[in-house]
Image: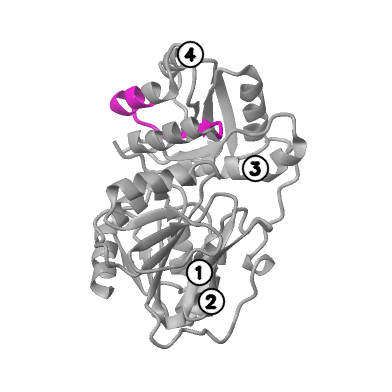
């Protein structure tokens, strides 16, 4: 196991676009905990550079000449595994390739910044740096001047008010809410695949750019007994179905008659994320109360901890992934520290607990 690095984390940028390399270098260099030690215009040059220095994390493009990012990643993970964050354009093909990269061992994926648009960088640069830092500290399986002002960190209050009177409906089926971030795509696959088709309705927030959630839901649906889809406005939460929040939209529950549906919201970033786990968990606490189960999985930061605490206070059973099985033990740690968690389990333990409660 590699020794855990300390800041500043060394970053190698691999991208065939000179403009993208320069933009990413500016973004990473704006964070005092990151140090760009080199840039490479293609994967072959990157391989040579790795013979001379070892970064803590690689920022890797998917589509490049001579050797594409997936081939480079596969070779790297076999010979010299280290944390990799894929930086991909938001196209249908790009999203499929990025998801494949997670299967090959990449820690996370991020959207390529909208070059030349300063306002866009202000929103996404903090997220990109957070993902790079999380990856640098992750478990790999198989002084700087800021040029931007960090985005204000909003709580779930910016989207949805808390309620002191949970409205769990008499006779209404139970519901499972899951939140995840860095490393969550693999963890969710491991948790959902063994679950039987008669599970209660499941709602999920996975931090992921907007073009990737459709492909992610489709890939999960192909491997699960449950029906897994990207959520649409007004879609009903029902037994045997998993709803994944679309990237760039908060997902909340809404009561229609005696049924739960989801509503989507494009409001402020919450904990610098949209979708936010806190927003989903709060809505579950408000409406479902003790007939719900909350699960927080691997991820950097604290998104979901406050919301899980509200679910816990509303009578929900709350579970957190243990440190040993997490890629990044950030979100679960925060939830445990604030007293929001009833049980801490590895992924196998979470699966068994959910099946037993169905």
Q: Is residue 352 above or below residue 173?
A: above
Q: Position of residue 282 (x, y in %)?
A: 55, 72
Q: Nearer the viewer, residue 264 or 104?
A: 264
Q: Position of residue 99 (x, y in %)?
A: 41, 38
Distance of label 1 from label 3 (alpha carbons): 30 Å
Is-magenta flag for residue 302?
no
Residue at label 2? 255
Splitting the image into 4 quarters, where does residue 74 fall? top left
Q: How is the image coloured?
A: one colour
User: Does residue 186 appear in the picture of this structure?
Assistant: no
Residue at label 3? 124
Q: Residue at x 54, y 15 (%)?
A: 41
Whether residues under marks 3 and 4 lie with C-beta atoms below 8 angstroms apart, the answer is: no
Label 1 residue SS: strand
Splitting the image into 4 quarters, where does residue 250 fall? bottom right
Q: Earlier in the sequence, mark 3 or mark 4?
A: 4
105 on left or right of 274 = left
Q: Earlier in the sequence, mark 1 or mark 2?
A: 2
Q: Position of residue 315 (x, y in %)?
A: 43, 83
Splitting the image into 4 quarters, where does residue 204 fall? bottom left
Q: Residues within 10 Å of mark 1 (few under 14, many from 20)?
A: some
Highlighted range, magenta: 73-90
Residue at label 1? 261
Residue at label 4? 65
């Amino acid at each position: 196991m590699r020794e855990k690095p300390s800041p500043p984390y060394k970053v190698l940028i691999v991208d065939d676009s000179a403009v993208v390399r320069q933009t990413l270098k500016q973004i990473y260099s704006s964070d005092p905990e990151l140090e760009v030690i080199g840039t490479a215009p293609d994967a072959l040059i990157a391989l040579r550079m790795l013979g001379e220095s070892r970064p803590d994390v690689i920022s890797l493009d998917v589509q490049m000449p001579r050797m594409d990012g997936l081939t480079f990643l596969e070779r790297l993970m076999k010979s010299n595994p280290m944390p990799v964050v894929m930086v991909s354009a938001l196209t249908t093909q790009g999203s499929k390739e990025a998801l494949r990269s997670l299967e090959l061992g990449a820690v996370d994926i991020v959207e390529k910044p909208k070059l030349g648009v300063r306002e866009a960088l202000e929103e996404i640069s903090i997220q990109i740096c957070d993902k790079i830092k999380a990856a640098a500290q992750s478990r790999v399986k198989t002084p700087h001047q800021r040029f931007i002002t960090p985005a204000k960190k909003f709580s779930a209050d910016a989207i949805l008010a808390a309620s002191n009177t949970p409205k769990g409906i008499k006779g209404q089926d139970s519901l499972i809410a899951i939140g995840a971030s860095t490393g969550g795509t693999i963890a969710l696959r491991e948790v959902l695949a063994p679950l039987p088709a008669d599970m209660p309705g499941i709602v999920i927030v996975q931090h992921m750019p907007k073009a990737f959630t459709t492909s992610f839901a489709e890939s999960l649906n192909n491997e699960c007994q449950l029906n897994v889809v990207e959520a649409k406005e007004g879609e009903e939460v029902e037994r045997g179905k998993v709803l994944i929040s679309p990237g760039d939209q908060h997902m909340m529950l809404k009561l229609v008659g005696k049924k739960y549906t989801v509503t989507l919201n494009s409001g402020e970033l919450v904990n610098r994320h949209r979708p936010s786990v806190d927003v989903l968990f709060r809505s579950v606490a408000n409406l479902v109360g003790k007939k719900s189960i909350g699960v927080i999985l691997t991820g950097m930061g604290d998104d979901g901890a406050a919301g899980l605490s509200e679910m816990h206070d509303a009578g929900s059973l709350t579970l957190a992934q243990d440190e040993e099985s997490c890629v990044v033990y950030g979100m679960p740690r925060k939830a445990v520290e604030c007293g929001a968690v009833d049980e801490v389990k590895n992924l196998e333990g979470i699966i068994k607990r959910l099946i037993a409660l169905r």
